[in-house]
Image (tube, rainbow, N blue to C red):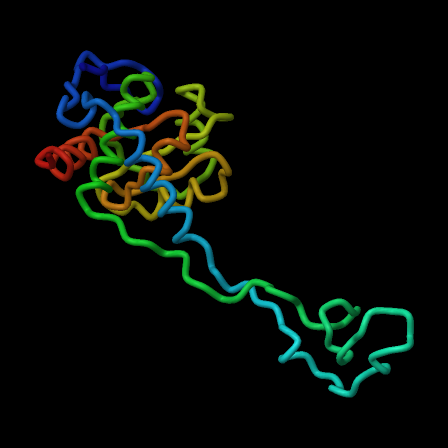
């Protein structure tokens, strides 16, 4: 598959670049995508939810009424989960939601997500550019050049660009990421991928040799 290289103003250049079929032309593996996305979302969970059970509630353990002859159900102490202010029965406890996935499966998931984007024509290749001022307005003008102002977008860069990050972080639907931090969830969550030429070569160097 060949794509035209664009300027940040939205204009097409005379150059075209060929996407690596071993990455962007594979048959996507839906189950690998599911597992990698599930792990990504699980790792974002804090797992700090906690409630107090009846043994942790402050209160008297004295029987609040006699066991028989009242016409109502028997009751133990005031910390009974049935009473207001009592302990929580089977409440959440702090836990770790992380689970392991093999590296090759994660690579396959990322390649599958990129292949879906290529099939859906959701990839825009940009020529390398300098972004010297951390102005959100400047980054919005780039998105508007490709009619992505109101859509979700992900821009992939080879090296860390602090100005580009600062300019995009206030935009709800825009994200800038280094190729080394690329994950399946971000790829699929974006309507379009904006990939710099140098970033595209970096993607091929990372994923191209994976079988």
Q: Is residue 87 above or below residue 16?
A: below
Residue 195 in the image: x percent, y percent?
27, 29
Which residue sits furthest left? 209
Residue 99 in the image: x percent, y percent?
33, 54
Residue at the spot 11% in from the left edge and 37% down from the top edge: 210
Which residue sits furthest right? 70
Which quarter of the rendering shows the C terminus?
A: top left
Nearest the viewer among 59 and 139 is 59
Residue at the spot 44% in from the left edge and 24% down from the top edge: 148
Which quarter of the rendering shows the N terminus?
A: top left
Nearest the viewer among 72 and 174 is 72
Residue 187 in the image: x percent, y percent?
34, 33
Which residue sits furthest front? 69
Is 100 situated left or right of 209 in this image?
A: right
Corner quadrant of residue 180: top left
How many labels, in total? 0
Residue at the spot 38% in from the left edge and 43% down from the top edge: 38
């Amino acid at each position: 598959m060949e794509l035209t290289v664009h300027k940040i103003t939205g204009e097409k250049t005379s150059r075209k670049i060929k996407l690596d079929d071993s990455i962007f032309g594979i048959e996507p593996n839906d189950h690998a995508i599911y597992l990698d996305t599930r792990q990504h979302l699980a790792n974002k969970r804090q797992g700090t939810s906690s409630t107090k059970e009846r043994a942790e509630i402050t209160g008297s353990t004295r029987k609040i009424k006699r066991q028989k002859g009242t016409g109502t159900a028997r009751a133990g102490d005031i910390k009974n989960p049935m009473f207001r202010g009592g302990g929580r029965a089977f409440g959440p406890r702090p836990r770790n939601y992380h689970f392991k996935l093999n590296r090759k499966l994660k690579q396959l998931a990322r390649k599958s997500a990129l292949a879906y984007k290529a099939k859906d024509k959701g990839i825009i290749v940009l020529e390398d550019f300098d972004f010297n001022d951390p102005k959100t307005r400047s980054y919005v003008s780039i998105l508007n050049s490709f009619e992505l102002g109101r859509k979700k977008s992900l821009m992939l860069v080879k090296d860390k660009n602090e100005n580009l990050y600062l300019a995009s972080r206030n935009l709800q639907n825009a994200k800038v990421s280094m190729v080394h931090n690329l994950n399946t969830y971000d790829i699929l969550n974006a309507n379009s991928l904006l990939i710099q030429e140098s970033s595209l070569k970096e993607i091929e160097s990372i994923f191209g040799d994976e079988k």
